Amino acid sequence: MLVPPSSPIAVPARRPASTPDLSGAVADGEVRRLVDELDGVSDPRSPLGLRYALPSLLALVVCAMTPTGHDSITAAAEWCRRAAPEELAAFGLPYDVLRGRFRVPSEKTLRRVLGLLDPVEVSAAGFAYLKPILAQAASAPAARTPDGLIEREQRRAHHRAAENDRPAPRRRAYAADGKCLRGARRPDGSRVFVLSLVRHGDGITLAGREIGAKTNEIPEFAPLLDQLDDTDLTGAVITVDALHAQRAHAHAHYLVEQRGAHYLFTIKSNQRKLAAQLAGLPWKDIPHVHRDDHDPRNAHGRREQRHVQIVTVDGLLFPHARQVLRITRKRRKAGVKRWSTETVYAITDLPAERATASEITAWARGHWTVENTVHWCRDVTFNEDKSQVRAHNTPAVLAAIRDLIRGALKLAGHANIAAARRAHTAPPQVLTLYGITRSP
């Protein structure tokens, strides 16, 4: 199969007369970061008769599913067929000399390849692509729209920070939680679950792992965090829900003793002895260190109050536990006099001199990033639950691709992912987003 010399993977050859001149569109040796990072995903296909390189196919799917409305493999294949020759050349696709055009993978090819890939490797490749951008985004100024106005969600976040006037936590915090891909089914009829580790605040996905049909989130927790280097995990705080606070407490030992990280576990009635011990603490004598009172106009038409208490403990029925947090939530709908009350406990291994009450409270609230930002966005903005793709590993692979797209748009300065997808309807905009640009 011949490739035009202007293609990024071209070999020295004489260009046939029927080959279009793309020298002004794509130059040899141009750095294309997305394609380079996806090169780390192992190709399970036989090397004989390969027509498309795996990084090119994955980069095509990522770019094709970025615009709004392109939530399925069928739509991704249509996007590829509509792309211009100079845009297809940037992906290193083979050139058909007889037809005088670049070959484009069919929908069947995309489905077959995605079903063979390892979701863990795709998720790791996505984070490897986003990781060098995280440091730049931390020091970059707030992203602005073309008319110079800060986006709506960024203004809201700025107002909330000004009202709270609380310092940001000193440690990195990540939330681990699982999600059911409701439209997907395995051959045996079981549902597909994906366990993810996301960063508090912006919801950038660091790692993902599909949960087997005959297991649950608990045994997959350590393998999920094993995907991260010690530089990413050491000193960080991992927040998890009550499901992972088991009697064996393996997660606490793993985080503190093996990885040098810290934890914030939510405790509910599934751990009766531990919950009873926490409820028996002298909470009446402990003052409230924080209180939130949400206005009904900003709380879905209901009044909300949060009272937070923190106490230092020793000898708790949980390894390395040093502080206990009690959050009392009170809710009342507009026009209703009766309050509904809920009490939640959380424990951490950080002592008072290493984690203040405001920091622990911020971590407890930041855990909802995985639900409000990640899962909600994939369900509503990417229509993940409506997808009925079921072949092999395809559901989990597409979930990792959606996380990559959402993270790239976030780090590009877009607070509203739906609006960002609408702003990237043209292929040149999508290619620029992922560093697949034309040479000057």
Image: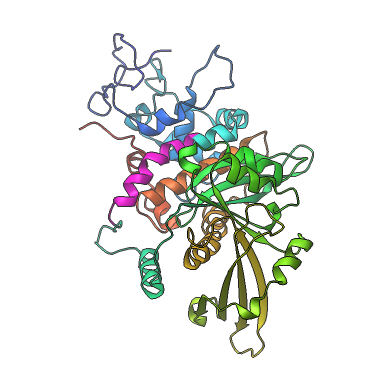
Tell me what residue is drawn at x 31 percent, y 9 percent: 13
Residue nearest the observer in this picture, 187 or 309: 309
Residue 72 in percent (x, y) is at: 56, 43
Seen as rendered, the residue at the extreme front is: 314
Residue 80 lies in the magenta-colored region: no
Q: Residue at x 64, y 51 (%)?
A: 179
Q: Main secondary structure of the magenta part?
A: helix
Residue 434: percent from the left, percent from the top? 37, 39
Q: Quadrant of the C terminus?
A: top left
To which quarter of the image does residue 226 belong?
Answer: top right
- Single out the residue that lies furthest toward the left: 440
Range of magenta residues: 125-141
The answer to whether residue 163 is seen in the rendering is yes
Tell me the residue at 33%/21% (across/down): 7
Residue 280 is drawn in which quadrant? bottom right
Question: In the rendered view, does 43 fall on the left or right side of 158?
Answer: right
26 vs 41, left or right, is left
Q: Against 111, is 330 above or below?
A: below
Question: In the figure, 382 relative to 62: above or below?
Answer: below
In the displayed structure, 288 sits above or below 246; it is below
Front position in the image: 308 or 338:
308
From the viewer's side, name the closer residue of 208 and 71: 208
Q: Position of residue 272 (x, y in %)?
A: 78, 63
238 sits left or right of 186 in the view:
left
Quarter of the picture containing the N terminus is top left
On whether residue 128 falls in the magenta region, the answer is: yes
